[in-house]
Image: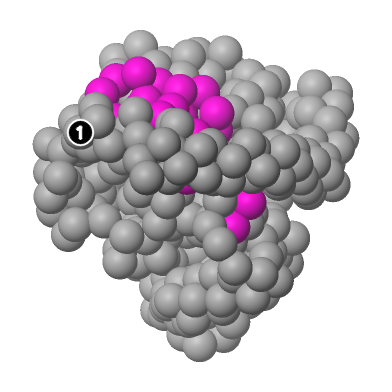
Amino acid sequence: MTHTSSASNSSVQSHRSPRVIVLAILFVIIAAAGLSYVKWWPYYGKALKAITDHTLGSSILGGNVDTSSAPSWILAWDYAVAYFKAVWKAAVLGVLLGSLVQVLLPSGWLLKVLGKANFKSTALAGIASLPAMMCTCCAAPLAVGLRKKNVSVGASLAFWLGNPTINPATLIFMTFVLSWKFTMLRLVFGILLTFGVSYFANRFADKSDIPDEVLAAAAETDTVENGPFLTRWIKSIWSMLLSIVPAYIIFVLILGALRVWLFPAAGIAEGNNLLVIIGFAIAGMLFVIPTAAEIPIIQTFMSFGLGAGPAGALLLTLPAVSLPSLLMIARSYPRRVILFVASSVVVLGILSGIAGMLFL
């Protein structure tokens, strides 16, 4: 009887193996096509602009940092329109890929490669984030999808944080618009955040690791979930839209309204001091921007007198996370993990600002 059962399992595995491979290849093709359209080709044009003009255009916060003295719904609406106009394609792609991760990629393979709470899984996920180059909110659905497939806390965070902070295209833009010194500052602290903070976040998870025997069993039965693909995909994408989109839209509006308080003109004009660095590190962690928007923001602020210290703080904290993106992933991680990541971004932002004040 045992022999019959074993033969049956072997037969099922051999039957499903080609299907697993086909579905995984399909995911790669969809991801590559989407990223080519939304990220890779547009960034080629942006890179040429950065190299020739030494600018990426105007700041999404507006050309004049002192256009209003108080928050308003007009500011909220104007910023939300500008923001969603810049990110909607990447946001749609992020939700699409985040749902497809759950229905196309084999659970066993993901567990084997990214399921352990060790540095290897964290490092592989951080490296895997490099081609995606998404902003923190657009990468959030992918992090949620990975967590639903039981990818470790550290690995899923490394993929999420690596997208905006060690984005190769942004580093190229930064070199030609700001300077290579800003690029090195961002790279050093981006690596610390992506690989270091993500790895240590495993300590704050409810289950820090998956037993080796579970990983071994999963690797041997490397299958996707049963059931019609379309049904599973619709269920996955609907769940994702329902859980993350409302908070995303609402808090983009709120932060758009509050941006004149988060980035006050007085703080910008004061230039370099530790208090401004701390304030801008916190504001940058909360605020939400499209990919690479921190570059024209910093360039504009420095033209108004912002010192290298606060600029160094914004360099890391503006792209790394935001209040909307933290809320988008909140249900997929323990609260103490979210608090650890948010506070780590602020602390590293302050250290980046101090380094900027001393060396830039």
Residue at 45% across / 32% down in the picture? 220
- Residue 326: image location, x then y, percent: 35, 59
Does residue 12 lie above or below 261 as drawn? above
Q: Is 115 part of what is drawn in magenta?
A: yes
Horizontal side of residue 294 vs 218, given as left or right:
right
Q: Observer-nearest residue: 320 or 236? A: 236
* Quadrant where the image shows the N terminus: top left
- Residue 330: image location, x then y, percent: 30, 63
- Residue 138: image location, x then y, percent: 57, 55
- Can you tell which quarter of the image residue 169 is in? top right
Q: Is residue 118 visible?
A: yes
User: What amino acid does circle 1 point to?
Assistant: Pro
Horizontal side of residue 198 vs 298, given as left or right:
left
Classed neighbour count for the residue bearing mark 1: other residues with Cα under 10 Å, few (<14), some (14–19), many (≥20):
few
Q: Which residues are magenta?
A: 103-129
Q: Is residue 306 visible?
A: no
Residue at 63% across / 51% down in the picture? 104
- Residue 22: image location, x then y, percent: 75, 42
* Quadrant where the image shows the C terminus: top left
Q: Observer-nearest residue: 348 or 153? A: 153
The chief SS type of the magenta part is helix
Residue at 17% across / 59% down in the picture? 335
- Can you tell which quarter of the image residue 216 is in? top left
Q: Which residue is mark 1?
A: 211
Residue at 74% across / 60% down in the picture? 89
SS state under label 1: loop
